[in-house]
Amino acid sequence: MILGSGGAIGALGVAASIAGLRNDASGRVRIAMNQNPPTLDISRAANGINVLRPCIENVVEFMIDKDPAGDIRPGLCDWTISPDSRTIEYRVREGVLFHSGDPLTAHDIIFSHERLYGALPSYRSRCYDLDHVELVDDMTVRFHFKTQGGTYLRLRGTHVYSKAYFDRVGDEYFARHPVGTGPYRMTDFRDSEYMDLDAYEDYWGPPPPIRQVRLLFALEDMTRVAMLRSGEADVIMAVPYSMVPVLSGLGFSQARADVHPTFTVRFQLANPNTPWADRRVRLAIAHAINTDAIIHGLFGGVPKSYPGFTPIEPGYDPSLQHYKFDPQLSRRLLAEAGYPNGFKMPLIYFANNYYGSRETAEAVIFFLRRIGIEVEARGMDSAHSLSFNREYARDPKAEIVALGTGVYANYMDPVEAMRFSYGTRQPNSWYRDPDFDKLVDAALRANDDESRAAALRACTRKIHEDLQIIPLWNSVVVYMMRPGVEFQPTQRDIPLMRVKDMKLV
């Protein structure tokens, strides 16, 4: 077995980690990540953008920065938004240089926007209300929206690339050798192995505390744990929840971030002939799953569970409660719906990106079997989730239930979470309800926080009552590190690794 037990072995593991940092010939702080980027070019990432972002955003920055709490702040641009929220004027920061030496201008903002808009569906979706972009001068650009631009602003605009660099080197070289304005330059990359980052000496912000980093791509959970204990890694992402008390007891420190997504059971309802097209069946499934047992029995109480938004988000509704665990009620509901002996149900679960998918699927299978539902489960790589959603969203013959990571709580903008994931007009949404769309439109039009929060509460109540999804637990990403490393992870986003928020003490 890779992992030993006992204080002496644990102390040896910590000592090895510290010595490893001093003796590493490269002098790099080593961070083991649970992802392997499918490409280095965001415009080509498609479904894999959330796999690329944790590493590449050390190199390529958004127009707008965010602090570790997840709130937006000026970065490459400052902004002014019109009183009606229909125009955002971005003023480019003076004196910013790309890693190629080219100065940042408003022309780069427009180039980046147009390139991503033409190639990346997820970026094109966030521009759903955009009317046109206006170049004011070399350092100023205006984005004009049909109704409101608040959502685009909260989503921080576009990643920013150099037009001059692209024009010099061409598309293929540009895609393989990314340059940005970020705190780190990429100096080496080996697919499925690592990415090396060096601090950028001309960075516009505070100098990064750590000068050299190696991001190691290690998809297996226990491999990353073993790397930390052996000294092969100084920091690891996505620590298995069961290993948190073990590693803490051995002297490693931890940091946590409340991030999206929410693990949910999600029903495809375009086919009216499936058992779960009947709300009583969906309600029976909700009452059959013991979320507390999953959280405390499988995950040591690390994750949290909210039926809607979390207390730190607009739209949080303390009156919203999970459906109570009640297997007897589940059986009665199934009988009323015409399934006293249960039925067979296919279940797709998405793996790789976030810890806990397989374990949650196994628990759901166990609970549903107790009420007579035989689950036929199959795992799928998370990188295919968006294309999978689009393929089956409107298929009237599909018989699909999915367990996976949905955009719900702890997203960068909760209004966008509702629109993108559950709006009828979205190609990846499995929810079809014109009344819900009206609630989302009200949230989009709201210009003050109170109105927006009220509209968001109405959205979550509608989803809760209709049971198109059953929220199970909210993702918490745990980082563990050797003594002498401090890290402040980013909240309310995907799990990120912003090395500029790490330091050695």
Image (cartoon, rainbow, N blue to C red):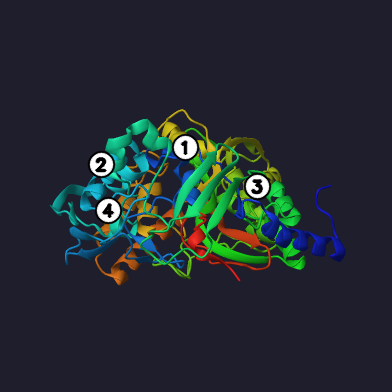
Q: Residues within 10 Å of mark 4 (few under 14, many from 20)?
A: many
Q: Which residue is mark 3?
A: 364
Whole-angstrom CA distance, mark 3 to mark 1, is 34 Å
Tell me the residue that label 2 is attached to. 114
241 relative to 60 in the view: left or right: right
Report if residue 237 is visible in the image: no
Given contact means CB atoms under 8 Å apart, are the residues at marks 4 and 1 in contact? no
**Of the image marks 3 and 4, the number of the one nearer the N terminus:** 4
Return the x and y of residue 468 as percentages of the image width and height.
Answer: 47, 47
Say which element carries label 1.
Answer: loop
For image coordinates 35% across by 58% down, the residue present is 415
- Spatial CA distance of label 3 from label 2 is 43 Å
- Which of label 4 and label 1 is nearer to you? 4
Please report the residue visible at 68 percent of the width from the left and 41 percent of the height from the top: 372
Res 304 visible = yes
Q: Which element type, helix, strand or loop, lies under badge 3?
A: helix
Discs 3, 2 touching: Cβ within 8 Å: no
Residue behind mark 4: 104
Going from N to C along the chain, the mark reached first, 3 or 2, is 2
The amino acid beneath tag 4 is Leu
**Crowd around label 2: few <14 · some 14–19 · many ≥20 (10 Å):** some
Per the image, label 4 sits on a secondary structure element best described as loop
**How far separated are the C-alphas under marks 3 and 4?**
51 Å
Name the N-terminal-most of marks 3 and 1.
Answer: 1
Helix or strand or loop: what does disc 2 sit on? helix
Quadrant in which the C terminus is drawn? bottom right
State which mark lies toward you, 2 or 4: 4
- For the point 35% across and 54% down, which residue is it? 62
Q: CA distance from mark 4 to mark 1?
A: 24 Å
Give the residue number, with chain letter if any, for mark 1: 39
Q: Quadrant of residue 77?
A: bottom left
Question: How far apart are the alpha carbons under marks 2 and 1?
Answer: 19 Å
